[in-house]
Amino acid sequence: MTEPVIAQKGPYAVDVVAGQDYFWCRCGRSQQQPFCDGSHKGSGLAPLKYHAERTETLYFCGCKHSHSPPCCDGTHKQLAD
């Protein structure tokens, strides 16, 4: 499987902390969305590491189809229901 599962059609608002690393789930199977819990094993997809340069609220992609991962770019609005 190389196509991700849609975890939710919309972003996850996350307060990130400067200097911290976050591992965004690419496969959509994680039970700890939007972050990886290891559920991707065998899917052909691996998490994406994001290093926060500053403390802020980011909107992590929930549909897993963003063209600017790990952040939402609105692609979920174009996905079929």
Image (cartoon, grey):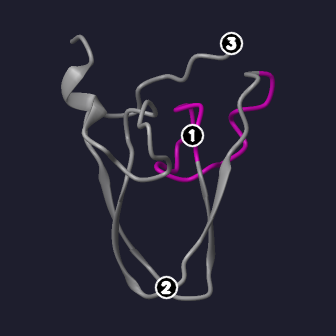
In the rendered view, tell whether residue 77 sits above or below residue 12.
above
Residues packed near mark 1 inside 10 Å, few (<14), some (14 to 19) or many (20 plus): some
Instruction: Name the kind of residue labelled 3 in the image.
Output: Met
Instruction: Give the percent coordinates (x, y) of residue 40.
Output: 70, 32
Q: Is residue 40 magenta?
A: yes
Question: Which residue does the image show at 21% across and 12% down from the upper left?
Answer: 81
Toward which corner of the image does residue 41 lie, by quadrant? top right
Of pointers 3 and 2, the one earlier in the residue sequence: 3
Q: Which residue lies under the disc numbered 3?
A: 1
Q: Which residue lies under the disc numbered 1?
A: 30
Q: Give the range drawn in magenta.
A: 25-42
Q: Which residue lies under the disc numbered 2?
A: 17
Toward which corner of the image does residue 53 lie, by quadrant? bottom right
Instruction: Name the kind of residue labelled 2 in the image.
Output: Val
Instruction: Name the kind of residue labelled 1 in the image.
Output: Ser
**How far apart are the two marked residues, 2 and 1, measured between alpha carbons?**
22 Å
